[in-house]
Amino acid sequence: MDRREAFVMKLKPGCEAEYERRHAAIWPELKQLLSDSGVYDYSIFLDRRTLNLFAFQRTRGEGGSQDLGGTEIVRRWWAYMADIMETNPDNSPVSIPLEEVFHMD
């Protein structure tokens, strides 16, 4: 079952370049975990005016990146990113799911 998911996260002021740098060097084991979990198309867009991060992903199967918080590699990535993003007490990014209201093939 293919799905599309979108969510919004928030970057801390002045962290735009560091966020891009860290994602340009995403850990190979994290990328592999995402792929193995069914994520096959994943983009994150930055609104530089608001520092909102808009994430969009396409997945196969039941899971997606938002379902991997129990894995050690994702918990390490969250800790690595916590200084530059708005986070929850467990270091997970504050993430607001978005409802799809239109799609055109």
Image (cartoon, rainbow, N blue to C red):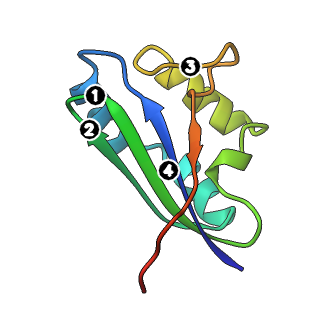
Q: Earlier in the sequence, mark 2 or mark 4?
A: 4
Which of the two residues, 68 or 22, is positioned nearer the viewer here?
68
Q: Position of residue 49 (x, y in %)?
A: 20, 29
Amino acid at the residue labelled 3? Thr
Which of the two residues, 103 or 87, is positioned nearer the viewer here?
103
Q: Position of residue 52 (x, y in %)?
A: 36, 33
Which of the two residues, 10 or 23, is positioned nearer the viewer here?
10
Q: Quadrant of the C terminus?
A: bottom left
Helix, strand or loop at label 3? It is loop
For the residue carrying disc 4, how many other residues have a C-alpha within 10 Å: few (<14), some (14-19), or many (20+)?
few
Q: Earlier in the sequence, mark 2 or mark 3?
A: 2
Q: Which residue is mark 2?
A: 47
Q: Which residue is mark 4?
A: 28
Which of the two marks, 2 or 3, is nearer to us in this view? 2
Q: Earlier in the sequence, mark 3 or mark 4?
A: 4
Spot the residue most to the front.
101
Q: Which residue is mark 3?
A: 87
